[in-house]
Amino acid sequence: MKNTFIIVLFCLITSICLSQKNVDSLILAGIEKKEQNYFKLQKFFNNVYFTDQETNFLLENSKQNNYLLGVVYAKNIQGRSYRNKAVYNKAIKKYNEALKIIKTINSIEAEIVTLNQLGVVYRRQDKIRSALNYHQQSLEIINKIGITSNDLKKSKSIAINSIGNIYLTLKQYEKALDKFKESIIIQEKLEDIRGLAINYQNIGFAHKNIGNIDIALNSYKKSLFYNNLNNDSLGKVICHNSIAAVLIKKGAFEEANNYITEVVTAIEKIGNNYYLSEVYNTLGWVSIKLNKYKKAAEYLKKSLKIGLKNNLPSNLVSTYNHLSELHQKKGNYKKALDFYHKSMELENQISSNNNIRYMNSLINKYDSEVHTNKIKDLAKENEIAKLKLLRNRNILIIALVSIALFGVLLYSIYRQNLLKNDKQILHLEQDALRIQMNPHFVFNALNSIKLYIINNEQKNAVRYLNKFSKLIRSILESSTVKEVTLGEELKTMGLYMSIENIRFSNEIDYEENFNKNLNLETVKIPPLVLQPFLENSIWHGLSSKKGEKKIKLSVNKLSEKFYQIDIEDNGVGRKEAFRIKSNKTLNRKSIGINLTKERLSNFSVQFENDYSLDYTDLVDENDNACGTIVSLKIPLV
């Protein structure tokens, strides 16, 4: 017998060890995977029951592997554990530690979940304003990012429902209804039956307290319908109890008695003391209405006993009311009055904790007391205060006059600098327009179009004349603004390259390359700022080159602070271009790179970061020059 016991004990210990080993292996696998989506991490650990030991194992190994989302998940589990034990200060500490890490890893999903959990902790402490604040923060993030995943939709619905329940606690029933209706819209799309049952139950409670009895009854029946679909035993009990209470108010006592009697066995089996107390209370109430005073006394006594033992204030208020009504019916007026006073006293205590009007009056009262104390202190020191006030007033007048004069001086200097800067910018823009519209370019363009006309190439003549007119119009329109979108600038450069390409018999292969996800319409740039770089590529890089001629313009977003424009040609290179230029007897005038740099400097003043301009000389495998890349980095912030 002893040996058998030892064998069984050994097998049990072995089984526990193996089970623990399997849990540890699953946790390590989750850490190794390093999932960066919080909801996916939740689903991965869905079948793990986290005791304190498992939570610490997850926390320590996540720290060792620098898996910060794993650390956040572990701290949220710790927070939930402390919350369930009603150790709220430690729960708040763990959630705040999680939030601090979340800010460094930018996990939106984790932030939303953690804010909602903090809201629940504060709501359980009846710290209504803090609870409302955290749930509102969660909703603001969800609405801002506009993510449509079902997990985030459910988080949004939870936050909205929680805010609705806060309003119920504060007896602001209209605001509560707005929140429940908003939550229902989401739950219907998610087909969340349990969520719909809860929301309709809450709506029924709000309407019952407003006085809309028929609407409340209809909402309770909808909730019961969803609880039946979900086969939720406790949900059915709650609905039957609520429906019975409404039917009593409507005077349908027999029907109410049938509704509540159906669920007595079920709630006694479930063992939820809160709702068991409510069911006994409703049974007692309906028994009074049916003149069954003995039964009423038995049920109300049971309800009272459970309420006192488990500290259920709201249930006790209702039980005291019904006991008062029972003793009044039986002619025991002294007892009836005693129970009535108990009910009122307890209800006032609850209201003092939960009613927002009381909370506001408490704050006002506190502010008023502070103000009164200050007045008393000032009255005691009145003589000294008069002298101090007189001295301080004189100092204040002198200080204000000095500040005003200094402010006028600063504004005058600022205004002068602003006018000077605007004048410089205007001068630069006018110079830029003159350069883009220089007679040499216009003459050559028109000459090229004229050749098409002479050669009777009407289609080409019309096409390029149309492009030329669009280019001129674009240049003229750009001269009236300080900034254009990058999309508009690229269109203008495309027209410019088409016109210049005529001179090269369309030999230049011009290509624009940019990420389709980059919104060119939101990126700003000085107008016509790319033209000088394209012109340099054409006349210094490609004009002296034989064979294939290419120019590629690329746009890339480097970060949230910068985007980069690269102009790459396969020309002769800068050294060779300089040598050819030096040997010419008549040098072509520069289009104005220096002027462009000044314009870029003025443009960058409004940003936190400055622009940069870099040149890269390209070489082939034999170290021979084979082109140039101009890289222009433009600030976004």
Image (tube, rainbow, N blue to C red):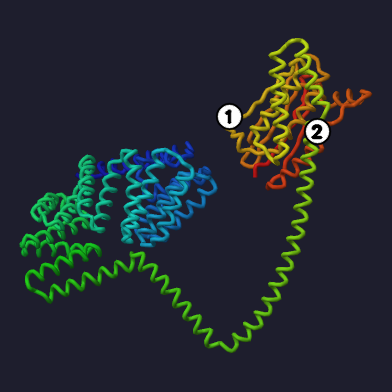
Among numbered discs 2 and 1, the one appearing first in the sequence: 2
Q: From the viewer's perspective, is 234 left or right of 591? A: left
In the rendered view, tell whether residue 368 sits above or below residue 547. Answer: below
Instruction: Identify the residue at the far right of this view.
Output: 585
In the rendered view, tell whether residue 36 sits above or below residue 539. Answer: below
The kind of residue tagged 2 is Ile
In the rendered view, tell whether residue 92 sits above or below residue 50. Answer: below
Tell me which corner region of the image, top left, top right, bottom left or bottom right, holds residue 313.
bottom left
What residue sits right under mark 2 in the picture?
Answer: 435
Marks 2 & 1, CB-CB < 8 Å contact: no
Tell which of 277 and 217 is nearer to you: 217
What residue sits right under mark 1 in the picture?
Answer: 516
Rate crowding at label 1 as few (under 14), some (14 to 19) or many (20 or more) other CA atoms within 10 Å.
few
The kind of residue tagged 1 is Lys
Tell which of 6 and 143 is nearer to you: 143
Tell which of 629 and 222 is nearer to you: 222
Question: Who's the residue at 39% across and 71% down the image?
Answer: 362
Question: Who's the residue at 36% across and 62% down the image?
Answer: 126
* Whole-percent x, y for residue 453 in the image: 75, 14
Instruction: Judge depth for marks 2 and 1 and give the one in front.
Output: 2
Tell me which corner region of the image, top left, top right, bottom left or bottom right, holds residue 382.
bottom right
Instruction: Identify the residue at the far top of this view.
Output: 455
Tell me which corner region of the image, top left, top right, bottom left or bottom right, holds residue 10.
top left
* Whole-percent x, y for residue 196 in the image: 28, 44
Q: Quadrant of the N terminus?
A: top left
Q: From the viewer's perspective, is 73 left or right of 465? A: left
Question: Who's the residue at 34% across and 38% down the image?
Answer: 189
Label 1 SS: loop
Label 2 SS: helix
Spatial separation of the CA atoms under disc 2 and disc 1? 32 Å
Rate crowding at label 2 as few (under 14), some (14 to 19) or many (20 or more) other CA atoms within 10 Å.
some
* Whole-percent x, y for residue 266 in the image: 15, 49
